[in-house]
Amino acid sequence: MSNHTDSPSALSRRSVLRRTAAVGLLATPAAGLLSACVGGGTDEPNTSATGQVSAENPLGVSVDTPVEVVIFDGGLGTKYATDVHVPSYQKKFPNSKVTFSSTQEVSTALQPRFASNTPPDMVNNAGSKLMDQGKLVEAGQVADLSDLFAAPSLDIAGKTVADTLIPGTIEQGTFNGKPYVLNYAYTVFGLWYSGKLFKDNGWTAPTTWADFTALLEKMKAKGITPYSYAGANAAYYQYLVILTTAAKIGGPDVLKAIDNLEKGAWTNDAVKQAATLWGEIGAKYGNKAHLGLKHTEVQLQQNQYKVGFYPSGSWLENEQSKDTPAGFDYQVAAIPGATASDKLPATGLYAAAGEMYFVASKGKNVQGGKEYLRHMLSKAGAKGFTELTKSLTVVTGAAEGLTLSPGLTSANAALTAAGAANFSFRWDAWYKNLDDECRSATNKLMFQGGTADEFCTRMQAAADKTEKKFSR
Amino acid sequence: MRQGKYPFVIGFLIAPLALYGMFVLRPIAAAVQVSMTNWSGLSPDFDFVGLENFQKLLDDDKVWLAAKHHVFLLVTLPVITIALALFFAFLLNMGGGTRGGTMTGVWGSKFYRVVFFLPQVLAVVIVGVIFGRVYAPDDSGILNRLLALFGVDAVQFLPEFGLWSILGVLVWQAVGFYVVLFAAGMSSIPAEIYEAAVMDGASRVTIFFRVTIPLLMETIKVAWVYLGILAMDAFALVMVLSIDEGGPDSATTVLPVQIYKSGIRESDYGYASALGVALAVFTIIFAVLSLRGGKRNAVEH
């Protein structure tokens, strides 16, 4: 785990007064604004409902103000919200109506509401049409969650919400030192394969690069595409893999430098080496046709035993549940070590809290939105989520006592094996333009004969052109 | 009656003009206004930045790439579509030769007319999805399965010939409408002219180039402008069909896709509006040029 959680002392200093002051500051960002408004809303500061703070109601939620919740209707579905979290909130505040809605196009549905300062209280910002989270924070539309994390947990006695989380969770949603976003689902990224295919052929998951290429060679001899990802819309699965290898070679600071848009972060030797290694894999063991395929198509081919390794996150098993043949047995392997002098062990993993939930700072019931998140972060709320979505949450130990699927069991095992050697990056969420650029650069490298040098120079140039807004 | 003329005219005009102002002019003015700000679209606040967005636009390689693709489409799409549509319309109307002194279409021309028009009634997104299967890069693709019968290796249509593939779909979808348009134009050409031409011993080819085309010139010009505007758009098809939304590596991107990416994905509505303004200016210039440039005395009949 990356142990960079905000220090508890920073949390305890907060009081209601400071909080309102902070919200007030956020509501009037940057001087010299035009008073005209394009979206047709008002600039009047929004007064959000509050209630009496007590041990039972640590966030001071107004007991009879409705709270509006918008959930992205994607791979995780919405049942976890309607069947678990909403009833939980409703039970505690029977007089506060939870207005629930879901959308497949978060940006289309909600962007106009933010532009007119009439946002819903709690938003699940996800999917391919998610809003630019960095820009939202910058625009002062997101509420500081410090008081939520400092509040006592709903059903884990004697602990604050922050204490119950997997280390690194709060950091993952921190922008310039303040926690704004709750990343709720805990995702393990690695190379996914069929346990059955491997067992039938007597293969084992490789830990060194030599073993890896030798295994890919064997798969190729069997007529299987040894390694593939979908170029048409999922190139980011692959750049995540390239940067994972870079982090293993040069340590997690390589990723930190990239996040901070440092000079030479992309042209670093570790990144270059990683890009060279993966470029070779693409040229030798990839399938050129997969540049034109979408992720579901490549994933289906893997289910048909036509693809060996596929890079993805731990949502894969749930996403493919309809197409996976019986006995396929999803397994995940950490990306093999690259060199003998790697700074991180071969078991190192890209693992991070993902799936963003945030509270709008200008909603009508800001504290209610935070309280809703507190219900999501209760042990019961997290357990219900894992049961319904087959995804782990950031709540420690919430999956205890559940029967996990093979893929999730394997992901859990990989996580245990990784120990402290797990890491992640943030730049893709902070700077969407870099994300777009890197998808193109990755496809070029893996499918179209691009070189590692081109990849690094191009990304460095794009990063240099980007205005720095966040750091970690 | 005379003194009541203006109130009468104004009475009729006021409602449509008000609607036009509200739903056409005002949004255009707003877009121009937003194009000179750094509005993120995520809050009501923004700064006025003058022409900064337009400066950025000139330095943006992807914009120039997109402009290049528009020029390619502007040249190829109208030429190919109009040529095909004229040819088919001619066959439908008079390809069957003369019967009893009048020109007739090829056998079954009524049926073909429906067939040609069919793609026009399909939604662009559906067309995109269908052609996704047609162009699929392995043997699950219709074209590649056909090629495989002749022992040809799978062709990477969208990765390697992205723009041509998209052009193909645009033509396929547009041609039907122009066949119908031209066919209507042709049937309004008086039969006597054709009778005279036939009596003078003109062949079908001569009739096509010397009689039909000159008399259809006005219709063709309109078609040219419409197709040019289509070439300036192509958004939905590129989004649905191309790799990585305008890729690979921006090889099929067009300005509307860049607008979408900078506006919706990257939350930079100011810059997106600047792109929109630029695109609108291009389109207007194109329309003016093609309507004026093609000006010559229309042949009357």
Image (spheres, rainbow, N blue to C red):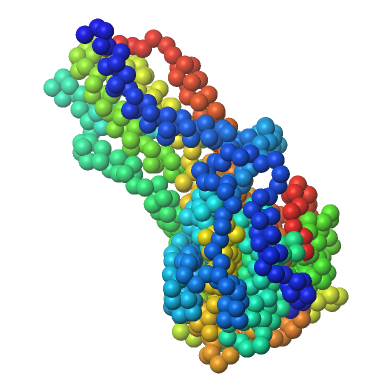
**Residue furthest to the bottom:** A401
Q: Kindly indicate the quadrant of the structure image that contains residue B279.
A: top right
**Residue furthest to the front:** A52
The residue sitting at 39% across, 41% down in the picture is B172
A372 on left or right of A397: left
The residue sitting at 62% across, 50% down in the picture is B266
The residue sitting at 57% across, 81% down in the picture is A56
Q: Nearer the viewer, residue A45 or B233?
A: A45
Task: Where is residue A219? Give x, y as percent.
Answer: 62, 76
**Residue furthest to the left:** B100
Up/down of A407 relative to A259, above or below = below
The residue sitting at 55% across, 41% down in the picture is A38
Task: Where is residue A127? Give x, y as percent.
Answer: 53, 62
Residue B16 seen anywhere in this rendered image of the structure: yes
Q: Nearer the viewer, residue B280 or A276?
A: B280
Q: Kindly indicate the quadrant of the structure image that contains residue B20.
A: top left
Residue B62 seen anywhere in this rendered image of the structure: no
B206 on left or right of A332: left
Task: Where is residue A221? Give x, y as percent.
Answer: 62, 75
Up/down of A412 relative to A124, above or below = below
